[in-house]
Amino acid sequence: MRAVHCQGPAQVWWVSLDGRNPAADGSAVSLDEQQRACSFVFDLDRQRHVASHAALREILARHLGCEPVSLRFAAGPHGKPRLADPTRPHFNLSHSQGGALIALSAGPEVGVDLEAARDLDDAAVLAARVFTPAEQEEWLRTPQPLQSRAFLSGWTRKEACLKAIGSGLSVEPATFEAGLDPCNRMVRMGTPGWPAHVEVHSLDLGPDWLGAVAWVR
């Protein structure tokens, strides 16, 4: 587990899920979390799910000065997890294959997203579906060998924004512009009933991962 440099109010940690102790992680999570892990077909996926939630509890407990197993969670209107005590910090978790990102914010709502770097045979189809026209042009200008990475960069930025406002997919990704470039960007999102303003920032995670964090302004 290591801290990741992040501009803005959030603290972000990178966690390697495959190097953890499965027995210790299993004892740190709740019965509900263990039961959700059982829905995965493969043992490795179950282990990674438990490891990511155990790491989340570890970080939150360290911040709050309590035991990981004592933490109680609730869900927002669209299912975004939060601590049961509304005065406690906001957090968000994302995991992909053997890695996880965890964001913690004592101020605004926060969202984080992680993707393992990989080649995408359907990147063009996905880009046409989830990117705005300007983002599609930006993606098409990217040299072909880098297009999969560029798509994942843009997608993690959009997902982080959506998770920050806790909307799920009630806001279509193609209706707001987060950009593909890793710089900080202000994003206006048309949520049902009110406009949300979010700031998004891509994270430097090395060649094997792409990630982004966003917070509500």
Image: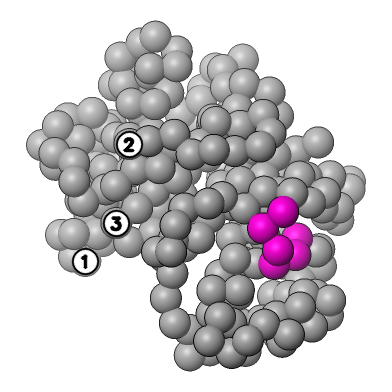
Q: Residue 123: where, in percent of width, then height?
A: 57, 85
Image quarter where the C terminus lies is top right
Note whether residue 69 is visible: yes
Marks 3 and 2, Cα distance to the nearest angstrom?
12 Å
Which stretch appears magenta?
Answer: 178-183
Amino acid identity at mark 1: Val
Marks 1 and 3, Cα distance to the nearest angstrom?
16 Å
Mark 1 crowd level (few <14, some 14–19, many ≥20, 10 Å Cα): few
Q: Secondary structure at mark 3?
A: loop
Which label's residue is closer to the chain start, 3 or 2? 2
The circle drawn on residue 98 is: 3
Q: Residue 179: where, in percent of width, then height?
A: 75, 65
- Camera-near label (3 vs 2) is 2
Residue corresponding to mark 2: 1
Residue corresponding to mark 1: 41
115 vs 64: above or below? below
